């Protein structure tokens, strides 16, 4: 069983408390993840551009109905981007379907600035995607092993009963863009814990398994994956849904970093040390009355 240790603390020059929040291994795996995720998203969009449609089922061709498609049509002599989600049809010229590339309108699902490489190349996109996918998996296994070996998974990421009881107040506080201070900032709140655990144990494994399901070689070695996900096309759709769920998590994560103070938050992920901001006097008085 992992030994529970008291976190390191110190004081800044002006007397504020500092805690050693992130170990060296956590910081290294975090920044490797940042690079991997950026490359995986951009190269994944390059791969998607080769066939910019998502289906549900085992097969999918241009003639089959798609649950999502990004394409271009010619209207009045001009290229127009059209995105269809089920029965809904949206004109997305300039963003999806048709975008500017070197001063010219180019017909492609995702624009060049969002893909890796920026020009059309399925082969290069796949090479980048597969290499960084395995680096991401290996890095994730190192991080997960660290969580288990140090007891941090249970100690820092498992929501307590008190936190579950405070779920709705925590949600309301986040919606009000509350900036955490004092003791509250020293631990993850229930929403953070739910988000992190969902990413680690739901969406990332889902990304890995659906990615393997799309591989013809894995279809031969593990045909049961096709049965689990209902075919390669369903697996591809789930893969992209999970990817955009992770993108949503990242967007909220980055927003929270800037809300809570980007210098302190980013510095803690570089040096490991997090400066605890003192509670405002009014908030401290309100807490005392409560």
Image (cartoon, rainbow, N blue to C red):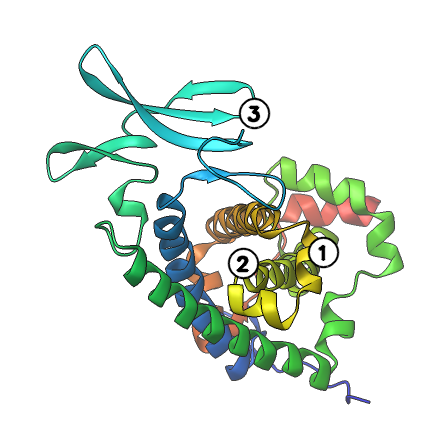
Q: Secondary structure at mark 3?
A: loop
Cα–Cα gap, marks 2 and 3? 23 Å
Assess disc 2: are there few (<14), some (14-19) or many (≥20) residues with their C-alpha within 10 Å of its C-alpha: some
Cα–Cα gap, marks 3 and 1? 24 Å
Residue 13 in sight from this viewpoint: no
| In the depicted structure, whether residue 240 falls above or below residue 214 | above
Q: Tags 2 and 3 in contact by the CB under 8 Å rule?
A: no
| In the depicted structure, whether residue 54 falls above or below residue 85 | below
Q: Which residue is mark 2?
A: 214
Q: Quadrant of residue 117?
A: bottom left
Cα–Cα gap, marks 1 and 2? 12 Å
- Residue displayed at 28% across by 40% down: 111
The numbered mark, 3 or 1, whose residue comes first in the sequence reads: 3
Q: Which residue is mark 3?
A: 86
Tally the numbered discs.
3
Question: Which dot, 3 or 1, sits closer to the camera?
Answer: 1
| In the depicted structure, whether residue 202 falls above or below residue 71 | below
Front residue of 61 and 173:
61
The numbered mark, 2 or 3, whose residue comes first in the sequence reads: 3
Q: Which label is found at residue 227?
A: 1
> Which image quarter holds the C terminus?
top right
- Residue displayed at 42% across by 60% down: 40
Front residue of 9 and 5:
5
Q: Secondary structure at mark 1?
A: helix
Q: Secondary structure at mark 2?
A: loop
Q: Tags 1 and 2 in contact by the CB under 8 Å rule?
A: no
Q: Position of residue 209 (x, y in %)?
A: 62, 63
């Amino acid at each position: 069983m992992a030994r529970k240790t008291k976190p390191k603390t110190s004081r800044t020059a002006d007397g504020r408390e500092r805690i050693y929040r992130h170990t060296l291994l956590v910081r290294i795996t975090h920044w490797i993840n940042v690079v991997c995720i950026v490359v995986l998203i951009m190269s994944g969009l390059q791969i998607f551009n080769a066939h910019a449609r998502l289906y549900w089922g085992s097969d999918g061709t241009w003639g089959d109905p798609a649950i999502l498609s990004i394409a271009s049509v010619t209207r009045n002599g001009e290229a127009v981007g059209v995105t269809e989600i089920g029965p809904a049809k949206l004109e997305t010229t300039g963003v999806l379907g048709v975008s500017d590339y070197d001063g010219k309108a180019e017909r492609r699902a995702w624009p060049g600035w969002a893909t890796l490489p920026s020009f059309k190349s399925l082969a290069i996109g796949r090479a980048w995607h597969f290499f960084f996918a395995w680096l991401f998996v290996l890095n994730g296994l190192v991080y997960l092993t660290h969580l288990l070996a140090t007891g941090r998974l249970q100690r820092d990421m498992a929501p307590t009963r008190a936190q579950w009881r405070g779920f709705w107040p925590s949600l309301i506080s986040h919606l009000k863009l509350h900036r955490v201070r004092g003791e509250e900032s020293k631990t993850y709140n229930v929403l953070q814990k739910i988000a992190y655990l969902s990413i680690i144990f739901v969406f990332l494994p889902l990304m890995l398994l659906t990615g393997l399901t799309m591989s013809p070689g894995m279809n031969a070695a593990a045909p049961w994956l096709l049965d689990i996900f209902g075919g390669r096309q369903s697996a591809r759709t789930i893969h992209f849904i999970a990817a955009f769920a992770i993108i949503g998590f990242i967007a909220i994560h980055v927003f929270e970093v800037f809300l809570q103070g980007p210098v302190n938050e980013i510095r803690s992920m570089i040096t490991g040390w997090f400066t605890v901001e003192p509670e405002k006097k009014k908030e401290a008085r309100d807490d005392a009355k409560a």
